Amino acid sequence: MIQLTRSTVGAFAFVYLDIYDKMTNTDYRPLFTFTSQATGYSFTLIAFSADYSDKERYVKCNFLIGATLNATLGFITFGNTAAPYGFYDVTVYQNSSNSNLNTTGLNVIYKGLANLSAEQTGDFKNPAVEYTDYNTNDSDTEVVWITF
C-alpha cells in the first residue's frame, strides 16, 4: 500500500516502490493513475522526479503537492471535494516519455491501494472530514409490525 501524506510545512511527498525489476526503461518517470474509492474521481500524472539510485531496494518517486493539478510536472492536489483524503486505487505504468499522459498500451508495473492523508501538526493544519455521533433519541418509539 502507498501512503502519501500532505505536509503542513513542505510541498513534497515521496513514494517508495519496489518496481525497478518490472521497468524496462529508466529514462522516463513513471505514470500514476489515482482513483478515489469515495468519489470515483480519477487523475493521472507523471511523478515530479524518480530516483533510481537505490534500485535494488526501491524507486523513489516525488510529487509536489499544491493548489492545482499539473499532470506533466508532478503537481498533485487532494483534500478537496473531488479528491478527498482517504483510499485510492492506484496503478503505476512504465511511461514512454516524460510528457505522455495516455495509459493506452503502457505496461502496468504496480497496481494496489493508496491512502492519501494530511499531517495534523503545525500552524497550517489540513483537517479531515469530521463526523458527529448519531443520536438515537430514545423518546421516539417506532414499531415495526411483521405479519405472516
Image: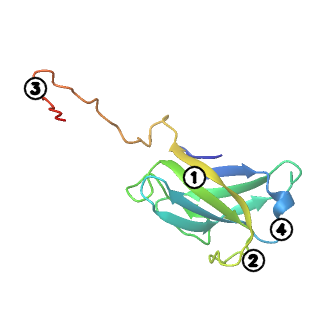
Residue drawn 70% across and 78% down? 105
Residue at image mark 2: 96
Q: Secondary structure at mark 3?
A: loop
Mark nearest the camera among 1 and 4 is: 4
Task: Find the distance from the CA under tag 4 to the CA under tag 2.
Answer: 10 Å
Residue at image mark 4: 26
Tally of numbered discs: 4
Task: Find the distance from the CA under tag 3 to the CA under tag 1.
Answer: 50 Å
Residue 91: x %, y % from top left? 64, 61
Q: Label 3 amino acid?
A: Asp
- The extreme top residue here reads 138
The picture quadrant where one finds residue 103 is: bottom right
The colour scheme used to paint the residues is: rainbow
Q: Label 1 amino acid?
A: Ala
Residue at image mark 1: 11
Q: Residues within 10 Å of mark 4 (few under 14, many from 20)?
A: some
Residue drawn 81% across and 50% down? 58
Give the mark nearer the N terminus: 3 vs 2.
2
In the image, residue 24 above or below residue 141: below
Residue 57: x %, y % from top left? 85, 47
Left or right of 45? Residue 139 is left
Q: Residues within 10 Å of mark 1 (few under 14, many from 20)?
A: few
Quarter of the figure that contains the C terminus: top left
Q: Residues within 10 Å of mark 3 (few under 14, many from 20)?
A: few
Residue at image mark 3: 140
Q: Residues within 10 Å of mark 2 (few under 14, many from 20)?
A: many
Mark nearest the camera among 3 and 1 is: 3
The picture quadrant where one finds residue 81 is: bottom left
Give the mark nearer the N terminus: 1 vs 2.
1
